[in-house]
Image (tube, rainbow, N blue to C red):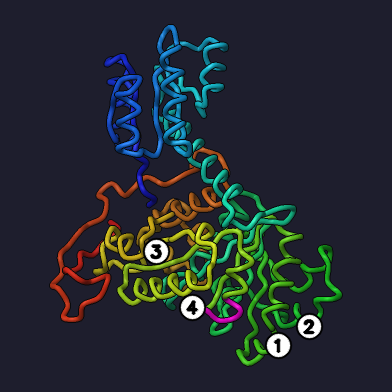
Amino acid sequence: MARVPEILVIDQDPRGRYELKQLIRQAQLSLAGEAGFGTEGVSLASEVTPDVIFCGVSTPPDRSLRTIEALLDILPETPVIAYGQNTDVEAVRQTMLAGARDFLTIPATMDRLQESIRSVLESEEKKKLRLSGQTKAIGPKGLVITVFGAKGGVGKTTISTNLGVALASGLHQSVVVVDGDNSFGDVAATLELRGDRSIVDFVRDLDQLNRTNVTEYLQKHASGLWVLPAPRQGMLWRNVPPERFRAVIGLLARRFDIVLIDTAATLSDLSLAALDEANMVLWVTSTDFSSINNSLLGLEALQQMQFPEGRIRIVLNVTSSEDGVRPAKIEEVLKRKFFWAVPYDKQVRIGSQVGNPAVAAAPESPGSRSLMQLARAVTGAGGEDAGPPEPPKRGWSLRRKPKPATSSPVMEGGSTDAVAT
């Protein structure tokens, strides 16, 4: 479950506002407020800072266009979607020139509304990724995504493998998962892959490898996903120095659309190399206290190293139906909003245990749908399942637990746990 976007509606016509609000409610989106054109609407927008603004287009459209321009002056990173009954090409062109990112013809369907919101939010995320000075440019290479967790057992490998299968089979991308966990790497075992070669062999022969023969050192899953396994004997990792690990990532990024790196649960030299080479970091945490506390310490350590925070996306993975810290409290402690949240799903856990990822074995389960949508989100892919998944119908079940004796940034003041239902 990702955060539900907050929508602001600006229109001088109360009837137009009412019709759009009804559509927003049907789509189970959050209404941040409503106002008329001009100063009324612009001042409210500056107060509530919504995720998306819908602005009605009047006839004549002059005041609507001035309002759109004023909104973008104060909130340049907030996408504006114009809407109205006028489908005249010139009217639509004028709203786009004023800065609107899309035009919604009224009456509209709920699906069309959701598609428009997904599209503009995905476009804004990709724009930030391109323009942020903190973001590593993708350039002519494939997208490198490092999946990191500051504690074992948070589902890091499960997310890596399911995301890889979703990207390969669902979105038809060329994808390789690099098992960079130099403690207990088990990506190959999770996918029931068996072979003799590992990253150690890849590094040994690296100078003779190129885009055409790298797959000879990889294993291929039935989904089309490629895997570079970890060595079976942990001591062999000493033959993989960080600089050679970086070279491995660079070579694979010139061969595949997407390189997924599953790391160890520590900020080791190899993990830091994987983080540094990534265009995007999916930082996985669970609702478990120790996972949150380790994430806080790890993020603080990266800050001290001046790691570009713009690359980090926090992913909440609910690994158990048991009690844990409530999501809002985790965001407060980490001082970051969740980029994504994967609900608890027994099918996802079973899939990892039997070597058959849930996105392939049980694609309609809540966890599988969420992971498939995550695949679309990280690549900016379109389609009806693109964008944040809808929250569970019953939402997060909040149950109060007794306050523990030990005080901490997370648990202080008592904890309320979150269970995906």
Q: Image point 20% across, 71% down: which residue?
A: 412
User: Do the numbered discs 2 and 3 sit on residues whose CB atoms are within 8 Å?
Assistant: no
Q: What kind of element bears circle 1?
A: helix
Left or right for 272, reference 154: right
Residue sitting nearer the eye, 406 or 42: 42
Would you place residue 107 above or below residue 339 in this image? above
Residue 24, given in percent of the width and then of the height, sits at: 33, 30
Residue 82: in magenta span: no
For this orientation, the residue located farthest to the bottom is 235
Nearer the observer: mark 4 or 3; the answer is: 4
Q: Which residue is mark 3?
A: 317
Q: Could you tell which of marks 1 and 3 lies nearer the N-terminus?
A: 1
Q: Amino acid at mark 1?
A: Asn
The kind of residue tagged 4 is Ala
The residue located at (28%, 58%) in the rendering is: 328
Q: Which mark is residue 239?
A: 1
List x then y, in percent, for residue 20: 33, 23
Instruction: In the rendered view, tell whether residue 276 sits above or below residue 112.
Output: below
x then y, percent, for residue 199:
70, 78
The answer for how far apart the CA atoms under marks 1 and 3 are is 33 Å
